[in-house]
Image: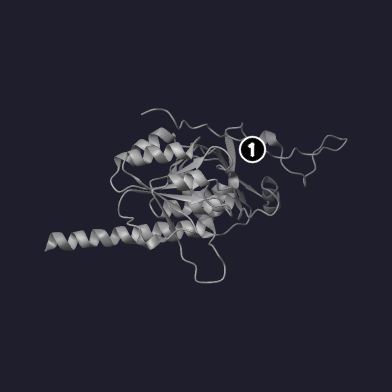
Amino acid sequence: MSSKFKVQSSKSKVQSPKSKVHKDRRPKTEDRRSSSEFSTQHSALIFGVLPVLEILRANSRRIEKIMIAEGSREKRISEIWQLAKENGVQLQKIPRENLSRYTEEGANHQGVIAIVASADYTDADELLEKIAAKENSLTLILDGVEDPRNLGAILRVAECSGADGVFIPEHRAVGLTETVVKTAAGATEYIKIAKVKNLNRLIEELKSHNIWVVGTSAEAETDYTEWDWSQSSALVLGSEGKGLHRLVAENCDMLVKIPMRGKIESLNVSVACGVILFEAIRQRRTENFKLRITNYE
């Protein structure tokens, strides 16, 4: 297959404010940690109980160190501690107020932070080949989602629904930031995510493999429940507020909508993603049940 969608590895350097120093050269204890405690640009911070726990369970990335707030007594914190010890991961207990200095202001680290190898993207060509080879595949394409919490929530829904992969554009869209990973609550350790330079070329490639490309639009005439999701399909979701780009919408095989019953015109993109993906699951289960009944008769 031609290399049209080669992934540009996105590994951002973890930024940590430098410690301020007195005239006697002793660092203030209340200042943030030095960036020298972190690794190179290949490292990232993951914080929150569930994201750190899933990283340990998945064992998909190198973990340099896990820091846990002193006095933490939660059951899942104990599980993190046990899994880290079993996997030979360095553990460190530090005061909770010191732990907060590793994260952005207002972030809820829940008493645990891990320094891990940066999340990486799957090669787009490889992901496309796997999806094309699978019967009744279910793929997600995001057309310019810019809010990291939305992307994190979408990735969590995609993983929970059993989607085969997620494609995101290389430009004008959020990537795998620390906030995305935290919001995804461990989903980034399992779901395949690929970046592409041109969504319209990707759509044409999917079509050439007999995969139906279904976009979402408030102006669509067809309800999302009226589409046959039991066949190989790629769901295309637009950006917050703007929706799908015109050319992307035109290249889709079908546009569907979620009918609104209230006074607000649309759902959050991550909520819409969940509604449609789990409708696809419902239809596929129903179809499988019908097939079993037919075969039994």
The answer, for residue 5, to whether it is visible in the render is: yes
* Residue 237 screen position, x and y as percent: 48, 51
Q: Considering the image in quadrants, where does the C terminus appear?
A: bottom left
Q: Circle 1: is it few (<14), some (14-19), or many (20+) Cα within 10 Å? A: some
Q: In this view, does 141 lie to the left or right of 65?
A: left
Q: In this view, does 238 lie to the left or right of 252?
A: right
Q: Is residue 93 left or right of residue 137?
A: right
* Residue 181 screen position, x and y as percent: 54, 47
For badge 1, the amino acid type reads Val
Q: Looking at the image, how many numbered discs can be counted on the residues?
A: 1
The answer, for residue 47, to whether it is visible in the render is: no
Q: Is residue 149 left or right of residue 32?
A: left
**Which quadrant of the figure has residue 73?**
bottom right
Q: Residue at x 56, y 42 (%)?
A: 175
Q: How is the image coloured?
A: one colour
* Residue 290 screen position, x and y as percent: 21, 62
Please name whichever residue, 77 or 290, is drawn nearer the observer in this view of the structure: 290
**Which quadrant of the figure has residue 108?**
bottom right
* Residue 211 screen position, x and y as percent: 34, 45
Q: Considering the image in quadrants, where does the N terminus appear?
A: top left
Q: Say above or below: 127 vs 73.
A: above
Q: Residue at x 55, y 39 (%)?
A: 116
Identify the residue under disc 1: 14
Which element carries disc 1, helix, strand or loop? loop
Please name whichever residue, 1 or 40, is drawn nearer the observer in this view of the structure: 1
